[in-house]
Every structure is written in structure tokens, then in C-alpha cells.
Image: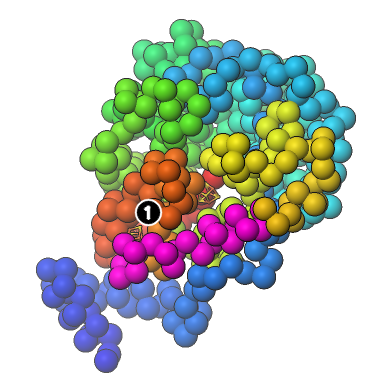
Amino acid sequence: MDVEGIAGIVADRYGKRKEEVLPAIQGYIEEISRKGWFFSPPKYTAPPAFLSLKRVHLNITEACNQQCLHCGAVTGTKREEELKKEEIFCLIEKLMQLGVDSLAITGGEPFLRKDALEIVNYASLRMNTILSTNATLITPDMAHALNRTNLTIQVSLDGATAEIHDAIRGKGSFAKTIQGIRNIMAGGSEGLDLCVTVMRLNLQDILPIVALARGMGIKGIRFLLIQRLGKARKNWSDLALSLDEQEQFYRSLYKDVIEKFPGIKIDAGLQGYSLQDRDTGIWCQIGRSLAITSTGDLFPCPLLTDARFSLGNLRKGVLDEIAYSTKREQLVQDYCDRLQHLEKCKTCDWRGFCQGGCPASAYLEKGSHLEVDGLCRLRSELYESLLFSLPEKRRGAADDVCC
Ligand code: SF4
Ligand code: SF4
């Protein structure tokens, strides 16, 4: 069958005119040919190096100076047995030896540790480093010291006004965060992004947040839907978006935001909505990621931190042995193989791209990774509209990463 024939079938199926569909089909065929998928589709099996670590999330303190309603940690207070600076340096060296190329340093609020700047600088000299902070403690001097290559500073901002941001993060926090952002920018850092956790309280504030970012000269924003972890679990009924609200958010993001603010790089945080041909064939990063708590406990990904997923503790084992342990291998294998067991996905047109969504989100929402996550309907609809607007999609969402 020729391209026109295919366009005719697609047009009939989706109630479009053939002339309208033809350019999209031609573009799509060119795209998959270029990627080599036309003759060799992406594989869904785990790659040989499926346990090789690339990305590590390191929480350096649970202490925090805000009281976010959705915080993934629960206490917000420092643990006595936190990893010491020397232990963290040692860990970073080990991660380098293991081939890790990206370290995300998180908290709590990292700058409640007096040695946070030293840790960040030590890491960014050795690998790509992402620092997650609420920026409230960043002074002009610190901002100057944070002007480094290999460092992205990701500042959490959950509202475009004090009214909304403070209702989520605590009184007075908006003004301090905005001042911290100004300090970072005055310090000359190029790699500054915002990170917005999307929930019911700020759903109407998405466009104003993007407008605020543009006004301040910020070039990237990462949106993440609230996850059922820590305090968010307790406040779930007040904070969580309904399915309709999630759809409203993503539609507004992909249409209004990406169209109206082309200069800002948007990471929509929508797992399973990516057309990138990852070398693993599986976009879930579970075989490549590791999450480490402030006391050295290891978990396979930042969303899987229940005791049952514990891989051990840095102080009680050797990192390579934990990273390549049978427990981790089995868990990663189960998660990578899950698509074969998802009944709903077996006949779905989009299974090659979507792959059943994020297994950890499915676990948090439904108690099992052998379920699809809550964004199944949304993704299948978005993929459909994507087929008719491939150039726009490539501009906007192709770089989404899972965690
Ligand atoms: S897709 Fe989900 S399970 Fe996989 S690494 Fe990312 S957050 Fe974890
Ligand atoms: S859209 Fe839904 S049914 Fe299709 S692959 Fe994704 S999760 Fe499975």
C-alpha cells in the first residue's frame, strides 16, 4: 500500500480529510525511517546493560525550612545519622567509577547543611549535577559560587503569587524564593530552571507561572504531577487532581503554554509521552537510576521508597554489590517485563511508545506495578492528536524524562 492509501485509512478512522492527514503521515514515515524504526522497531526487552547506573538522586538532608503540603518526605527535620561530607565525596567518586553521569542533589532543603555548597561543587566538577532547592537561603555570595558549568539549579516554585505559593509552601516563602532566584540570576548562572509540582491548589496558576518565568528570563520549567508520597499521601483528597483536571492541565500545557511561550523549554513530566528512541528501547529509567536517602539507604527509583524496595544501606554494603545485587536485578527485570502482562495494553496502538506508563506511579496509585498508571486515557488521546501535529510535538515534549 502506498502513503496515500495509508492516509486514506487514517483519515477515515479519525474523521479527517485525506489532504489534511497526508503531510502528517509523510512526516511520520520520514521520522521513523530516519530513526531506523521502519525496518527495526524498538525492542521492549531489557537491554544487556540494563542495570547500568546513569542517574542517581541523592538526598543530602531531610531538614527543611518550608512546610509543603505535598512534600515527599514526612518529617522535614534533620536525621542524626545523615551521611557526612566525606562519605558523600567518597560516594561521588564511586559513582564516577560506575559510569554515572548525572547526580541530582535534593533535600529537604540542601542549604540547611552548612557543607552543601562544598558538596555541590565537588559533584559538579565530576559529573552533570542538578541541585533541587527552594532558593530561600541563596545569598548573592552563594549564587556567585554556584555559577559553574555542569550545574543546573532547579528551583521549586508552586505559584505565581504569594497567595498560592505560600498556601502550599508556608507563609513568606514566595518572597524569599523570588529573591533567591534573582540572586542566582545576578550571579550569572545559566542553568536555572523552575520545578513546579502541579496540584489542585495551583492548577489555575500554570500560565501565570510560565509568564512569571519568562518575565524573569528563566529558560526552562519542569512540571511534575503530585505523587502519592509522604505528606501528599495524607493530604491526597485535597491536593490530587482528578483525571479530568489532569487532562485539562496537559491540554493547556501542550496547547497554550508551548504555543504561547516558544522560548521556554517545557518538560511536562508526562511519563510515557515521548517519541525518543532510547537506546534501551524502554523509557522507564529504573535500570539506570538509584535513589539514596540522607542516611544512605538505597532504592531503585525516587518513587519506590517503601521498605519493601530497600536495596540496602551504603554504610553496610559495597555500592557495586548493591547496584548489581540479585534483588535489584530481579526488580528491574520485573518492571521492564511488565508490558507483556498488562492486559489493557496488549491491543493498544500506542503500547510501543507508552509502554503502560510509569510502573512506580501505577504502584503508588493502585498498589501494583502490574497495572497501567492513571494517565492511560490521557496518553492515548494525546498520541492521537500527536499523529496530526508531529512538528509541534517535536518542538515541545520530546525531551520529557521520567524522573
Ligand atoms: S518511569 Fe517511573 S518507575 Fe521508571 S524510573 Fe521513572 S519514576 Fe521510576
Ligand atoms: S495508552 Fe493505556 S492501554 Fe495503551 S499502552 Fe498506554 S497504558 Fe497501555
**Residue 289's spot in the image, x, y percent?**
64, 49
**Residue 251's spot in the image, x, y percent?**
28, 45
The residue that appears at 47% across and 61% down in the rendered structure is 338
**Residue 63's spot in the image, x, y percent?**
65, 17
Between 205 and 148, the residue placed more toward the observer is 205
Is residue 362 shown to the viewer in this render? yes
Q: Is residue 312 magenta?
A: no
Where residue 128 sits, quadrant-wise, is top right
Where residue 110 sits, quadrant-wise, is top right
Is 289 on the left-hand or right-hand side of 236?
A: right
Location of mark 1 (residue): 372
Q: Is mark 1 within 8 Å of ligand 2?
A: yes
In the depicted structure, whether residue 215 falls above or below residue 52 = above
Between 59 and 128, the residue placed more toward the observer is 59
The residue that appears at 44% across and 40% down in the rendered structure is 364
Categorize mark 1 by other alpha carbons within 10 Å: few (<14), some (14-19), many (20+). Answer: many
Give the residue type that dot 1 points to.
Val
- Image quarter where the N terminus lies is bottom left
Dominant secondary structure (helix, strand or loop) of the stretch shown in magenta: helix
Between 319 and 181, the residue placed more toward the observer is 319
Q: Which residues are magenta?
A: 328-349
